[in-house]
Image: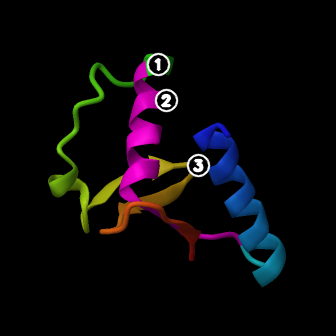
Amino acid sequence: MDIIKEIKEEIDLFTVSTGRPPSTLYLGEDEALMLAQWAYDSGYASSVGYPMKTWVGNRRPELFRLNVYVVNEDRHLACS
């Protein structure tokens, strides 16, 4: 499945279950790489080779008005 679709579904699921929109998005390393690949393929980024160790625990730019963090797990996708 497309990473953008997965993220939108997670946002919708969070909003429906809590009654409020999320403010933060947490991605695993696999999801972060898929997002980086999507950004490269879409022309938003000039390279995919982001060093993951500098991403983990650091706030990334916003996506859908959510602060994005990469957590130290391979597969993870959650909102808060």
Q: What residue sits 30% from the left and 68% below the top?
A: 72
Horizontal and vertical percent position of residue 10: 69, 61
> What type is the residue that disc 3 sits on?
Phe
Are the two marked residues, 2 and 1, in contact with CB atoms closer than 8 angstroms?
yes
> What type is the residue that disc 2 sits on?
Trp
Is 63 situated above or below 19?
Answer: above
- Which residue corresponds to mark 2? 38
- Which residue corresponds to mark 3? 64
Is 73 situated above or below 35?
Answer: below
Q: Residues within 10 Å of mark 3 (few under 14, many from 20)?
A: few
The way the protein has been coloured in the rendering is rainbow
Q: Quadrant of residue 73?
A: bottom left
Q: Nearer the viewer, mark 1 or mark 3?
A: 1
Horizontal and vertical percent position of residue 13: 77, 68
What whole-number distance in Å separates the C-alpha atoms at marks 2 and 1?
5 Å
What span is colored magenta in the figure?
Answer: 21-40
- Which residue corresponds to mark 1? 41
Q: Is residue 31 magenta?
A: yes
> What type is the residue that disc 1 sits on?
Asp
Q: Is 9 on the left or on the right of 79, as rendered?
A: right
Q: Tag 3's secondary structure?
A: loop
Q: Quadrant of residue 1?
A: top right
Q: What residue sits 24% from the left and 55% below the top?
A: 55
Q: Considering the image in quadrants, where does the C terminus appear?
A: bottom right
